[in-house]
Amino acid sequence: MAVMKTALRWIAYIFAGLLILVLAISAIVMWRFNASLPQTEGEITVAGLQNETIIVRDQYGIPHIFAETRHDIFFAVGVVHAQDRLFQLDLSRRAAYGTLSELMGKLTVRTDVQSRVLGLGNAADQSFDNLSPEAKAAFRAYANGVNSVLSAPGFVPPPEYTLLMAKPQPWRPQDSVAVLKVMAATLSGDAFDEPGRAKLLEILGSKKLAEFLAPYPADGPITLSEADLGLDTTRIRENTETFSSASGEPQEGSNNWVVGGQLTSTGKPLLASDPHLGLSAPGVWYFARLQHGDEMTLGATIPGTPFVTLGRTTDAAWGFTNTGPDTADLFVYPAEDIHAQAEEVVIKVRWGADQPITIKRTSQGPILDPAWFNAGKIAKSGEVVVWQSVLDDGDDTTGQIGVTFLTVKTFADFQNSLRDYIMPQQNMVFADSRGTIGFFAPARVPVRDENGIWVGTIPYDELPVSSNSERHYYASANNKIVPDSYPHYITDSWYGLHRIRRIVEMIEDTELHDKRSFSRMQMDTVSDLARRVIPFVAASEPATDGGKELRQILQAWDGNLAADRPEGLIYSTWMRHFTTQLYQDELGDDFEQFWAARREFVDGVLRGEYASWCNDIRTSNVETCHQIAGNALDSTYLEITKKYREPIADLKWGSIHQAKFSHPLLSNTPLGRFFNVRVPVGGDASTVNVAHSSYRSGNFDVLWGASMRAIYDFSDLNSSLFMHGPGQSGNVMSPHYRDLAAAWGAGEFFEIRADWTPQSPPPNSVTLVLQPKTVENR
């Protein structure tokens, strides 16, 4: 018995010791978490600053920076980015240079190998060398600002570094260019879609493939008319048919539109911008105002860069959507014909064995090793695949447009400032205080010969551009932007058809617009496709009482996927069942790879153009489209009633369909519940208020959406409206980490005024004064 008591006593001691150790470690971790919050009030002395600089943060944590020189403006942007988004900066830089595995281990080895092979980091370093002196100075000042935070006494990095037991490395000016390269890579035309298209061609044949990829319809809205571009309407470029992506509608989408004073209640232009990107915590953008004397820009900056990318000056505003140009190609060559230089590279892997690779580069671009690139597998024995892209260009001067944007006042200024813009091609809408509205889509877009070989680029003066359209508006949603008479090829994969239809409808159906009509447009959750589905479903033939109940609900519906109603869930579940029955039989074992909404294709089915797809080729019967629509209703009823306990009428789309702002590192770990941010939303990928979820995920989590929203009112630019989510800060301990998420989901806005000063700051603001380190105060 004594031995037992002694053993139990030692067990108790060990348990108590372990508990104390766990509590001590937890206390240390929490101390470091809280200590990582930045100083936002008072005064800091920093080396590298030229003059006193003031940072006033408003109630949302948005900095208003007041400086005497451009150098100090860019330095201070580096300071606030490092204070609020340091881990995000680091990941972006590492993604470009292929060094994620040095921080995160073997999970990111494939990503690192691909980045090294594609050469984004090397191209960024070369691009920096080609920038103007003004741009280089801006990036150097920014880097010094970032590093002043890292080198400050008592600096504690953000919580992610504590969890990883790591510390951030100093920032280089070239790293900012690398961040821009990563952004361009996510938005550029994807050559890696070509193997998927080739596989579909093998499965379906050319005729069925053309239907499945659904060409942009003849009645689909086109952003620029022949009159806008001054084109000869009798000339049609050959091979103008355009198709959707092999993988389905791309996630990278956006909306923007601008209307002239003829269409507004104030007689002044209005401009709306809401780029759609992956929802992340923290978000893609960081709002800021930069004030240097009378020179002012405000809006969305990209963390890692010192400039306002989307925003306004005192006299002009602009917004971007992705054009999606075909700026990359895969070429298959006999291996014996290739002359390549080989480079031995080692990917350093934390907590694991380093990964050696051999990178082979030709004058056209790198060879894609099938061990690391699926695209490399399209080569047969004795062949290699070469990737050619403008991303690989070392003379990219896109990084310097932020300097030229500082003084934009007119559309001519805007066009001239973009002569150095190389990638990615964007549909840019513009307005200025003189009443001019405009559209421009600049970039380096390849011109190919009849064999697909690159022989040049579209001349700058022949890129799509227009001002003061006779329609008094420009609108784009990743849709087709040029008519068939436009002489140059941009892409054959336009998308966003249903969003642009709805945008044009709302612009033209409102007699005079104001900020309220624009905000309603940005938050609109009416689906153009859903409205086309309703009469189709009404004529369907469900076999069960449950299917007939759903048919009745949808028959009375207006196509609005409202977050507080059940119809969005019914329709979206039906779409998944309908598309499964529509083309699973044709694709067979490859169905999962290519399963997506394919709304343009479904639209063609609704119109009767592709009715043959409704027949199940695995049976001897001949199924009709209305039959499979009814079967999909029956299946939808069974799925909904099995998954959800509430009566169908009490279900809410937003309860199931939630925007998920995912943390890039911890999203799928137990800590994800603390670092991820969720908010109910309506809509789907086809609505103006876009909410993209994956069919293959098995849920309705929204992973892509409006990364920010802005409405610029030229009757009073200070009353312009802004929003992004989930918050300004990337530090999970900050009150500004998630404070904007609910407002973002509800369609609320705030102002970022340019008439606030250090002497009359915004309400509930805090002020931090940066003082230059001098001999006297060292």
Image: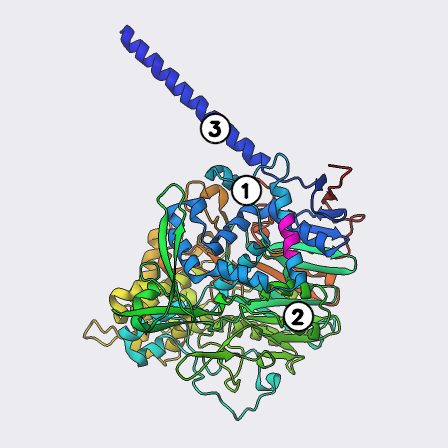
Given this view, does label 3 or label 2 mark the residue nearer the observer? Answer: 2
Q: Which residue is mark 1?
A: 732
Q: Looking at this view, name the residue that lies furthest to the top.
A: 2
Q: Earlier in the sequence, mark 3 or mark 2?
A: 3
Q: Amino acid at mark 2?
A: Ser
Q: Residue at x 60, y 56 (%)?
A: 305
Q: Amino acid at mark 1?
A: Val
Q: Which residue is mark 2?
A: 417
Q: Alpha-carbon distance for marks 1 and 3?
A: 19 Å
Q: Amino acid at mark 3?
A: Ile
Query: In front here: 611 or 61?
Result: 61
Q: Which residues are magenta?
A: 138-144
Q: Which residue is mark 3?
A: 25
Q: Residue at x 58, y 61 (%)?
A: 128
Evaluate whether residue 542 shows in this view.
Answer: no
Q: Which numbered marker is on residue 645?
A: none
Secondary structure beneath label 3: helix
Query: In front here: 211 or 65?
Result: 65
